[in-house]
Amino acid sequence: MIIKPDYNLKCVYDINLDELKNQGIKVIMFDLDSTIMISKSGCYRPETEEWLNEVKDKFTVAVISNNKSEEYIGKVQALSDFTVIGHASKPNPKKMKQYLNSLGIKPNEAVMVGDRPLTDIVAGKLLGCKTILVDSINAENENRPTRFVRWLERRVIR
Ligand SMILES: [Mg+2]
């Protein structure tokens, strides 16, 4: 099925970086909101920043977000020493494809990590890269409607 991710993990910190490295992965693309940053918070948690530093030692890192606000994306870019791309229109993989092309990287050398099956994971599948679905970085504090939508979306991938 097109929405089944290669890995389904509790959170980004569970990603086995050495395993990805051994599989020939060179680039890790992350969704932003709820994946590596609490939705609309505009800042990284210190532990996330620390973890991202470890990721950056081993891989080229980028953020691919559907957020359309140039101001918000600009703010996140200012906090990040890696590429932050907004207005990505996932599940359309076009921006991801353009980004990988700019690096001379093939889709099978990249992975897409996100919290939403219908946008992040489908985009990765359409692009032909590996995909990692993670639970929301802030799952314990989300409201009921949000948790319901997540539950519903995850039913599709089982
Ligand atoms: Mg997200």
Image (cartoon, rainbow, N blue to C red):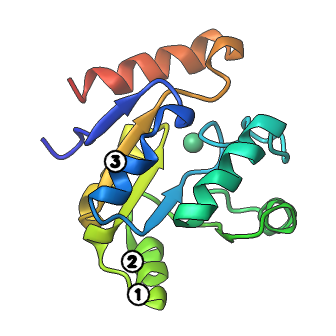
Label 2's element?
Answer: helix
Q: Amino acid at mark 1?
A: Asn
- Mark 2 or 3: in front is 3
Q: Amino acid at mark 3?
A: Glu
Q: Which residue was labeled with disc 3?
A: 19
Q: Which residue was labeled with disc 1?
A: 101
- Say whether residue 98 is left or right of residue 57: left
Residue 97: percent from the left, percent from the top? 39, 77
Q: Is residue 3 above or below residue 98?
A: above
**If you read the primary sequence from the N terminus, does the residue marked by circle 1 or circle 3 appear first?**
3
Residue drawn at (85%, 46%), measured in percent from left and top? Answer: 43
**If you read the primary sequence from the N terminus, does the residue marked by circle 2 or circle 3 appear first?**
3
Residue drawn at (67%, 44%), measured in percent from left and top? Answer: 51
Residue drawn at (54%, 37%), measured in percent from left and top? Answer: 12
What whole-number distance in Å separates the C-alpha atoms at marks 2 and 1?
6 Å
Q: Is residue 127 visible?
A: yes
Mark number displayed over residue 97: 2
Q: Quadrant of residue 82?
A: bottom right
State ligand 1's quadrant.
top right
Residue drawn at (68%, 24%), measured in percent from left and top? Answer: 138
- Disc 1 crowd rating (10 Å Cα; few below 14, some 14-19, many 20+) is few
